[in-house]
Amino acid sequence: MARRKKLYEGKAKILYEGPEPGTLVQYFKDDATAFNAQKKDVIEGKGVLNNRLSEFFMTGLSRIGVPNHFIKRLNMREQLIRQVEIIPLEVIVRNFAAGSMAKRLGLEEGATLPRPIVEFSYKDDALGDPLVPEEYIIAFGWASQQDLDDIVALALRVNDFMSGVMHGVGIKLVDFKIEIGRVWEGDYMRLIVADEISPDSCRLWDIETGQKLDKDVFRQDLGSLNDAYTEVAKRLGVLPSNVTHATKPTLIN
Ligand SMILES: Nc1ncnc2c1ncn2[C@@H]1O[C@H](COP(=O)(O)OP(=O)(O)O)[C@@H](O)[C@H]1O
Ligand SMILES: [Mg+2]
């Protein structure tokens, strides 16, 4: 096969031209970055786990009618996705205080929030993805009020789905980030979930022990990131539960 055209290389993934117009191939790298890429490492096998976990969550969302970019998994590290026009926002949903919110408001990590809170950061590494109010988003034309209403509704559906799935395997969904993109069908525009949903983009705590099973393991040097992600994958039935090693996950089906 001829080498595909690389369209974009980011911190965690590479996008290649897809086989059909309107499709892309999303390749999951092993690179881990945190604190706006000031902390970096290569975690062998992370890309394989995230490819499989993002597939698992996106197909689950499709099953309950939440539109998203996933088409099919191609191999251990790649999936075929629908090309979208990414809205330059990180859409964050929080159920419990953690990370930047806990810091900003002086809340204890893990404090229960009165209700799920949706917030937006402007996706710009050079600026450190600053939190932006809806007023900015509308004024700068990144999204309309109608788009924002739709995005909040989508984000809350993803939150209900992810919280339920995680609760079923003894994991608390503290918060997560998604990206939303536009797809066009003639003159008609729809908003769909894009990018990835994985332990890189969620905070996941074991309900019993509070053990962190997400990228904070890397951010805070809490142990093996692969062990944490493998634990999530095993509980969800994405990996067979008798896998003992961490660096080279075995995929089922
Ligand atoms: N379906 C899609 N169509 C077009 N772009 C996408 C799609 N899904 C994700 N992206 C973009 O692809 C890139 C994924 O690579 P990533 O390593 O996460 O990049 P970054 O370092 O910019 O976060 C992101 O910029 C993301 O916005
Ligand atoms: Mg990214």
Image: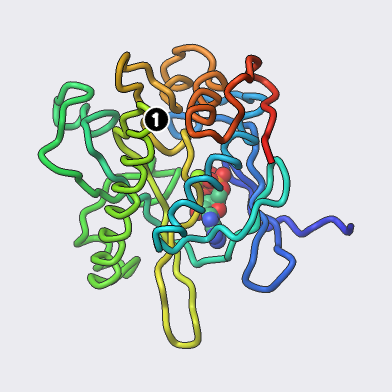
Q: Residues within 10 Å of mark 1 (few under 14, many from 20)?
A: some
143 lies above or below 76:
below
Instruction: State the residue lying farthest toward the left.
Output: 114
Q: Nearer the viewer, residue 164 or 188?
A: 164
**SS category of the residue bearing label 1:** loop
Amino acid type, residue under disc 1 in the picture:
Val
Q: Which residue is mark 1?
A: 169
Q: How is the image coloured?
A: rainbow
Residue at x-position 35% and y-position 28%: 171
Point out residue 27 in the picture as x, y percentages from the top left corner: 66, 47
Going by the image, does 241 lie left or right of 157? Answer: right
- Tell me the quarter of the image containing the C terminus: top right
Residue at x-position 43% and y-position 23%: 213
* Res 104 → quadrant: top left
251 lies above or below 58:
above
Point out residue 160 in the picture as x, y percentages from the top left corner: 29, 48
Instruction: State the residue lying farthest toward the right.
Output: 1
Instruction: State the residue lying farthest toward the bottom.
Output: 187
Callout count: 1
- Tell me the quarter of the image containing the N terminus: bottom right
Residue at x-position 45% and y-position 27%: 215
Point out residue 43 in the picture as x, y percentages from the top left corner: 62, 24
Going by the image, does 148 lie left or right of 62? Answer: left
Point out residue 65 in the picture as x, y percentages from the top left corner: 40, 63
Q: Nearer the viewer, residue 60 or 2?
A: 60
160 lies above or below 41:
below
Does the closest atom of ligand 2 sit within 8 Å of the Cβ of label 1? no
